[in-house]
Image (cartoon, grey):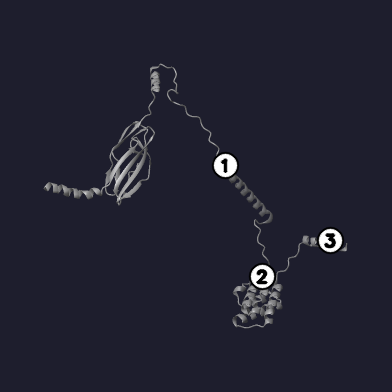
Amino acid sequence: MRRATLVVLAILFFTPISAQRASVQATVQPTEILIGEQALINLKVITPKDKTIQFPVYEKEIVPGIEVITMLPPDTTVENNVMTLNFKYVVTSFDSTLYHIPHMPVFDGVDTIYSNSFGLKVSSPQLSDSTLAYLEKINKGETDSIDFEQLQLHDIKPVRNVPFVWTDYLWVLWIVLGIMMLIALIGLIVYLVLKKKRKGYIFKPPVVLPAHVRAIQQLDKLKEEKIWQQGREKEFYSKLTDILRNYLVEREDINAMEMTSGEILNEVRKLLEVESVYNNLKQILSTADLVKFAKYKPYPDENDLSMVNAYFFVNQTREPDPVPQKEEMDKDKNEASQNDAAKSE
């Protein structure tokens, strides 16, 4: 009775422990192959699902003579908290013998567990009876020549012509395109160099209008807006004085944007001797200061006068027109004489 009780307790004690341990089984299919053929080794692991299993990785051979071609990803199934994993190795061999694999190790995170042992038989191709008999004759010297067809030894097959595939020759197209682009680049460089020698520039510089032309254009735009007639006198005089200040910066190289009205008038008096020019500018700047800083409400005639004086100031200080060249003057005279002759006819 005491012995039976101990046996029952031992079973109850060891059952949970054994249930937590992974089991490993290794099989190979087929068990016999010819030299150079492939076999599939399946390493099956049954373990609790919370275990992390690490399978063995073979870089070249499992045992000497059995080469690993590839290792397939594991197949995993889980049922009732039990996980089943199948890890497969594709192997081959080129020596005819019976190979014995003693075990394959698996690590479950705590212990290393070994699989069962198994074997793989690798055989050489079998020759026919007629071939064996012919080999016997050759060994005995009963034949003067060797018939390779009877020995089932065949010559290397002739080289086959690969069908034409245009994508295989894309590299030729890329080379041609590269050469064409290089030639075009060289031609462009030569053209630009010759153009610079002939005209003095590679890219045509933008046409910059004279300062007085741009100032007149800005005054024309301000005049068309007529904002002083809308009760926006302060805005009108701010724009008007900015146009004149910018004009002085470009035309006379005066830092008018950073000067007061009095400083601008002093500089203008030094540079320009015409009194009317000074007076025209003074009327504009004085009225503008009163509007902007003293909240002065000018009369409509004063606004019109400021606009007219701005035009006068720009026209009186503008750059002189360029003197026409002799060729242009002769051309104009010829055109005028031709026109007179046509009118007389």
Quote the CA–CA distance across marks 1 and 3: 64 Å
Q: Which mark is residue 338?
A: 3
Residue 333, quarter of the rendered image:
bottom right
Nearest the viewer among 343 and 41 is: 41
Q: Are marks 3 and 2 in contact (CB under 8 Å)?
A: no
Residue hosting label 1:
172
Which one is earlier in the sequence, the residue at label 2 or at label 1?
1
Quote the CA–CA distance across marks 3 and 2: 40 Å
Residue 243 screen position, x and y as percent? 64, 73
Q: Residue at x 62, y 48 (%)?
A: 184
Mark 2: which secondary structure? helix
Which one is earlier in the sequence, the residue at label 3 or at label 2?
2
Residue 61 screen position, x and y as percent? 35, 38
Mark 1: which secondary structure? helix
From the viewer's perspective, is the residue at label 1 or at label 3 nearer? 1
Q: In the orientation shown, which residue stands out farthest toward the left?
A: 1
Nearest the viewer among 78 and 142 is: 78
Q: Few, some or many C-alpha atoms within 10 Å of disc 2 (few <14, some 14-19, many ≥20)?
A: some
Q: Which mark is residue 251?
A: 2
- Above/below status of 152 relative to 263: above
Dot 3 amino acid type? Gln
Q: Residue at x 38, y 22 (%)?
A: 129
Tell whether 13 sits left or right of 109. Answer: left
Q: Are marks 2 and 1 in contact (CB under 8 Å)?
A: no
Which one is earlier in the sequence, the residue at label 1 or at label 3?
1
From the viewer's perspective, is the residue at label 3 or at label 2 nearer? 3
Residue 214, quarter of the rendered image:
bottom right
Residue 331 screen position, x and y as percent? 79, 60
